[in-house]
Image: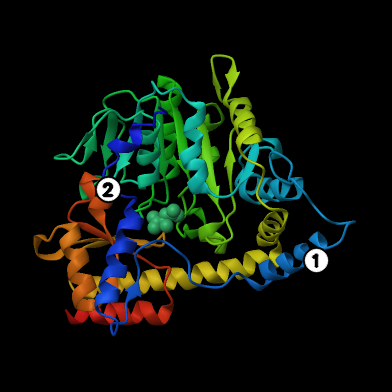
Amino acid sequence: MFKINENYLKLPGSYLFSTIAKKVSAYSAANPDKEIIRLGIGDVTLPLAPVVIDSLHNAVDEMGKAETFHGYAPDLGYEFLRNAIVEHDYKKRGADISADEIFVSDGAKSDSGNIGDIFSVDNKIAVCDPVYPVYVDTNAMAGRTGDYIPEQQKWSNVIYMPCTAETNFAPELPKETPDIIYLCFPNNPTGSTITKDELQRWVDYANKVGAVIIYDAAYEAYISEENVPHTIYECEGARTCAIELRSFSKNAGFTGTRLGFTVIPKDLKSGDVMLHSLWARRHGTKFNGAPYIIQRAGEAVYTEEGQKQTGEQIAYYMNNAKTILEGLKSAGYTVSGGVNAPYIWLKTPDKMTSWEFFDYLLEKANVVGTPGSGFGPSGEGYFRLTAFGSYENTVKALERIKAL
Ligand code: MLT
């Protein structure tokens, strides 16, 4: 009889956003007359920018002619896209990354889960608490996290780095030495950021203890303040300790189109083995590339017009973030985030648990958010709202919350 990967049986419940979707569907089916406003999952609502649509149309036409048809994409992604990425995302920031260190993919979520393939199951991971659940769940699937302890909502073999109001929702260097450190800034879910000096401390620490940092910079386009790093490679020494994950979902609305990339510098080694070679082997074997038309769409994001149009989208969402922040503050809520990130992190009122507040908001205001405890035990008593809704819905949601 075949055997299953029993690590899957250790996972508690379903994926956070699937659980929420089920709850909302059930409520909606029972209350068909209610108009529900969704500020839960971080999914964008604005249509793709015109320049992206033009590029898609052109690429589709190319696919319809023998002379310009494209089959399998090159393993690392098309050069036109990797060159644009290097120019815009790295050179401009003074970061030393070359096009052959970029691996184009179908998104940062898959990469953040798949990257574990190249690491031994014996590595110990450290994660922020609260944290984007994909990092922990995928490590649990790989058998790297020990057992789940329901009373603590923790895994036995994971180093949790609490990110609380006392630490400005940033992690402190862990007491126990990890092998793999997951960092995400601007942060999902809290919307917090760290300064370049603070990130430099992590890079120095990782180099000192021989750990690798998996740095998720999916939200970097939302940074509005100076001195907040856009890429970990702005830090000295990051080439020998950091992998960076990037996404086109949040900066250019590609959640339904799927495009991202992972950066692995060739200097990042375990002994004399380059992680770059392992990921290249993995990528070549298990992945056949993001579609040509989508990579062309990604290229369009980096054009002058693309930067202008996607910049306007980001400004639109950040205006929503401001509306939520100010609205909640005026209603007496304790809030953070929402300045360099499209997420607003609020303390639940009246000592409600995160899930109690979720139900309360859904039933009384017909507004959907994400319970903080779904991101980890330190998220208990907190709640996340996203700025990715329409402005009209954001205003309406805030009016309803204020009226409670
Ligand atoms: C979220 O809501 O946290 C995001 O949708 C995460 C993601 O991009 O997968």
Rendered position, 342 above or below 246: below
Classify residue 355 by image quadrant. bottom left
Pointer 1 residue? 61
Task: Determine crowd level at label 2: few under 14, some 14-19, many 20+ residues with C-alpha closer than 10 A.
Answer: few
At 63% from the left edge and 68% from the top edge, which residue is drawn?
Answer: 308
Rendered position, 255 above or below 104: below
Return the residue nearer the eye: 143 or 187.
Answer: 143
Pointer 2 residue? 13
Which residue appears farthest toward the front when viewing the image?
A: 1
At 36% from the left edge and 77% from the top edge, which residue is drawn?
Answer: 394
Task: Determine crowd level at label 1: few under 14, some 14-19, many 20+ residues with C-alpha closer than 10 A.
Answer: few
Q: What's the colour scheme?
A: rainbow
Q: Is residue 106 visible?
A: yes
Return the residue nearer the eye: 38 or 26.
Answer: 26
Q: Amino acid at mark 2?
A: Gly
Residue 41 located left or right of residue 243: left
Classify residue 170 by image quadrant. top left
